Structures are given as structure tokens and as C-alpha cells.
Image: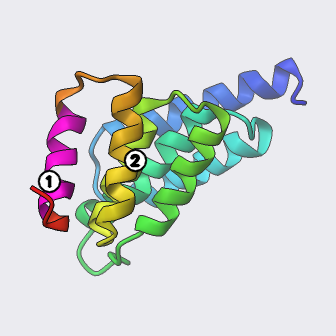
């Protein structure tokens, strides 16, 4: 169990990473991941940090500088979202973004499972309803 000082430091590192991520500067994602990893070393049971780390991996190929490593990082994103929902099974956005990552990796059946879980938690969420429809379309079940 992390002590209070470690939790405060983890929060500060997480907030610093979020600011860097949200500023939209291209090429900062390696630095953001470093901050999130440092925060998780201090507070490994923080589902929000796992979720945010998953978002970095999900967006990786879109936001890296030309010439840098732009291969998709969907499996890393999925692993982070899985950790987030293991810590908080009612984390609808983590379920939904995991579904997006599965869909981007071509696994539409798993994407559909994740969107259904997100919709169990928030039945009227328009984003997850649209993504579910897209997954069904990709599976040919429209």
C-alpha cells in the first residue's frame, strides 16, 4: 500500500503527464508515458492513470512526429484499459476505449463485447451506441 506522500507524488506526476498530453504537442508521448509509469510505480492501483496511459497508446500512431515510431500500439492500450476495469469494473469509458482499441486492431467481436459492457453501465451513451453499431456493421450483424 502506498503511503500518503507517494500518493501525492503520483498525483502530481499524473497531472503533469495529463497537461503535457493535453497541450497537443506532437512527439511528447514518450515523456507522458514516462510520467505515467513513474506515477504507477508509486500508485499501481490508480485506474485513472491506467486509463490515461491507455489513451496515449490508443492515439500513438496519429500523434507521433513523422519519422518516429508510429506503429499502432493497440495491444498496449488494451492492456492498460484491462487494468483500469479490473480496478474499477464500472469504468464505462475504459470499457468503451478498450472497445475502440479492439476495433482498430480488427477484433470487432471483442470491441462489441466492450461496447456492450460500457452500455450496461451507461445505457444511453451516444458515443458507445454509435461504436456498437459500427462494430455490428463490421461483423455483418446490422
Asked if marks 2 and 1 touch (Cβ < 8 Å), the reply is no
Is residue 136 left or right of 98 when viewed as pictured? left
Residue 101 lies in the magenta stretch? no
Where in the figure is residue 50, as x and y percent of width and height?
57, 43
* Main secondary structure type of the part rendered in magenta: helix
Q: Is residue 36 above or below residue 134?
A: above
Is residue 39 left or right of 76 when viewed as pictured? right
Q: Is residue 127 above or below residue 83?
A: above
- Distance from disc 2 to disc 1, alpha carbons, whole Å, reads 13 Å
Choose the circle earlier in sequence order: 2 or 1.
Answer: 2
Q: Which image quarter: residue 65? A: bottom left
Of 64 and 55, which appears nearest the observer? 55
Q: Is residue 60 above or below residue 66?
A: above
Q: What span is in magenta?
A: 127-137
Disc 1, SS? helix
Which residue lies at the image location 81% right of the left edge and 28% below the top edge?
Answer: 6
Which residue lies at the image location 29% right of the left edge and 64% below the top edge?
Answer: 108
Give the quarter of the figure containing the C terminus. bottom left
Which residue lies at the image location 42% right of the left edge and 38% below the top edge?
Answer: 117
Provide the residue designation for mark 2. Answer: 114
Give the quarter of the figure containing the N terminus. top right
Provide the residue designation for mark 1. Answer: 134
Residue 20 visible (yes or no): no
Disc 2, SS? helix
Amino acid at each position: 500500500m502506498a503511503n500518503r506522500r507517494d500518493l501525492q507524488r503520483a498525483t502530481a506526476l499524473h497531472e503533469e503527464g495529463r497537461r503535457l498530453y493535453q497541450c497537443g504537442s506532437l512527439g511528447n508521448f514518450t515523456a507522458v508515458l514516462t510520467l505515467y509509469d513513474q506515477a504507477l510505480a508509486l500508485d499501481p492501483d490508480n485506474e485513472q492513470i491506467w486509463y490515461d496511459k491507455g489513451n496515449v497508446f490508443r492515439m500513438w500512431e496519429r500523434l507521433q512526429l513523422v519519422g518516429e515510431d508510429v506503429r499502432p500500439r493497440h495491444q498496449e492500450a488494451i492492456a492498460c484499459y484491462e487494468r483500469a476495469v479490473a480496478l474499477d469494473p464500472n469504468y464505462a469509458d475504459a470499457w468503451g476505449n478498450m472497445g475502440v482499441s479492439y476495433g482498430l486492431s480488427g477484433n470487432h467481436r471483442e470491441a462489441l463485447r466492450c461496447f456492450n459492457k460500457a452500455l450496461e453501465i451507461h445505457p444511453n451513451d451516444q458515443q458507445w451506441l454509435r461504436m456498437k453499431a459500427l462494430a455490428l456493421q463490421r461483423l455483418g450483424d446490422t
